[in-house]
Image (spheres, rainbow, N blue to C red):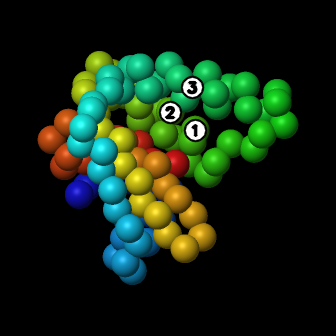
Amino acid sequence: MSQDGSFSARAALAELETGADFEVFLNQTASAQRLWSIWSWRHEVMPDTGVTPRPGLAEAVTGLQAAGTAQVYLATVTASRRRFILVLSEDLAQCVACW
């Protein structure tokens, strides 16, 4: 699986290489544009509500926007200290976003 090059994607890959759990939700896809509209808004209002955005969220929002209307899958990497959310391309070959 190619990674998006962000710090979070590299950290998620490192966790996978050491045995972290990986799950892809194959039962549905979403438009990257739709996910971008949700997560860009959340990222924008988090500081106003006292919530610190997760590491990598800003880069993930950029990756979602760049993916446009492409259909994508959600996935998770669950490590001992952190759970990563990944957005994978429709062919499951690339990581579009990770936070």
x and y percentages locating residue 9 in the rendered image: 43, 56
> Which residue is under mark 2?
61
Q: Is mark 3 on a helix, strand or loop?
A: helix
Q: In which quarter of the image is residue 96?
A: top left
In depth, the one of 73 and 93 nearer the eye is 73
x and y percentages locating residue 41 in the rendered image: 61, 22
> Which residue is under mark 3?
40
Q: What residue type is labelled 3?
A: Ser
x and y percentages locating residue 12 in the rendered image: 44, 63
Relative to 70, 55 lies left or right: right
Q: Residue at x 48, y 40 (%)?
A: 60
Disc 2 residue crowd, few under 14, some 14–19, many 20+, Cα 10 Å: many
> Which residue is under mark 1?
58
Q: Residue at x 84, y 37 (%)?
A: 50
Q: What residue type is labelled 1?
A: Ala
Q: What element carries label 1?
A: helix
Q: What residue type is labelled 2?
A: Val
The disc, 1 or 3, on the residue closer to the chain's N-terminal end is 3
x and y percentages locating residue 72 in the rendered image: 28, 34
Q: Are marks 2 and 3 in contact (CB under 8 Å)?
A: yes
Relative to 7, 96 lies left or right: left
- Gap between marks 2 and 3 measured at Cα: 6 Å
Q: Is mark 2 on a helix, strand or loop?
A: helix
